[in-house]
Image (cartoon, grey):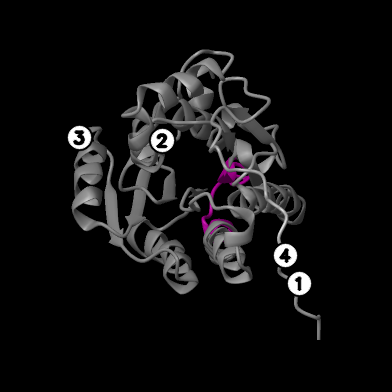
Amino acid sequence: MTILDRFRLTDHVAVVTGAGRGTGAATALALAEAGADVVISSRTEDQLARVAEQIRATGRRALVVPANLARTEAVAGLAQAAYDEFGRLDVVVNNVGGTIPNAFLDTDVAYLEESFHFNVSTAHALTRASVPLMLASVGDPEEQRQKSVVSISSAMGRLGGRGYLAYGVAKGALAHWSKLAATDLAPRIRVNGIYVGSVMTSALEFVAGVPEMKEQMETGTPLGRIGEPEDIAAAVVYLSSRAGKYLTGKMIEVDGGIQTPNLDLNLPDLQPTDVAPATAP
């Protein structure tokens, strides 16, 4: 086996959430180029159809499952859909997630809980549903050890930055969830994740349209540029394949080298108030 053979996922089956565009779409296509058949899901069917066409152009199969992935029963159902369609399940990529930045006093409990649900509970629901089906995918012992879960976290899950409380807490929780799940699922299933930096997806379209903000992000990144979806997709292939077979419970930082947030949201300091706090019950 050559070193490049270790990156191949020939005849593996993968599930990628949030795969209609951006990082999810690039990841689904990369896995197909490495040899996997892919189940792709997001809300928007026409976006998924375009990604499926690209997957099929590589010679691999694609199953499109439009769904509201904020619903844990919907995201969990993707595991069975993969097994029913392809007869096995090897790779799960927990990519769906995200939360809009918010000031501290605008971040109520419901907002925090919603962020946790969308970023962490969905990943747990899909992975929990996938584990029995991964173990049921009969293969030789070496192949069976290559079952892999990859969670897409964020650099804000390890950094401090004003305005990112709900998002950062949820992504930090997802990272630690990955480490704990790795312990529970070893040695048959590896669980790793990626701390993603700023990547040029639709979420950053506004930033890209404001030269001053784009320049701030680029100059605030040691490598001097905003990331591309393929940068993340390549890391997912590594973690999913035999190339990464000696990694579990690890978080890879694919973020251009940042050690501090590269975008200041310009949220002001809190100011003194004359309003007395309510008495706690």
For the residue pair 163 and 88, the one nearer the viewer reads as 163
Residue drawn 46% across the image and 52% down it? 96
What amino acid does circle 4 point to?
Asp
Contact flag, marks 2 and 4 (Cβ < 8 Å): no
**Label drawn at residue 57:** 3
Q: Badge 4: how crowded within 10 Å, few (<14), some, or many (20+)?
A: few
Q: Are marks 4 and 1 in contact (CB under 8 Å)?
A: yes
| Residue type at numbered disc 2 | Thr
Residue at which label 1 appears: 276
Left or right of 128: which side holds 212? left
The magenta segment is: 134-153
| Viewer-closest of 135 and 153 | 153
Name the disc covering residue 10, or none.
Answer: 2
Who comes first in sequence, dot 1 or dot 3? 3
Q: CA distance from mark 1 to mark 3?
A: 64 Å
Residue type, numbered disc 1: Ala
Instruction: Please provide percent x and percent y for residue 131.
Output: 59, 60
Asked if residue 216 can be seen in this view, the reply is yes
- The quarter in which the N terminus is drawn is top right
Q: Earlier in the sequence, mark 3 or mark 2?
A: 2
Q: Where is 192 relative to 2, above or below?
A: below
Q: Is residue 5 left or right of residue 180?
A: left
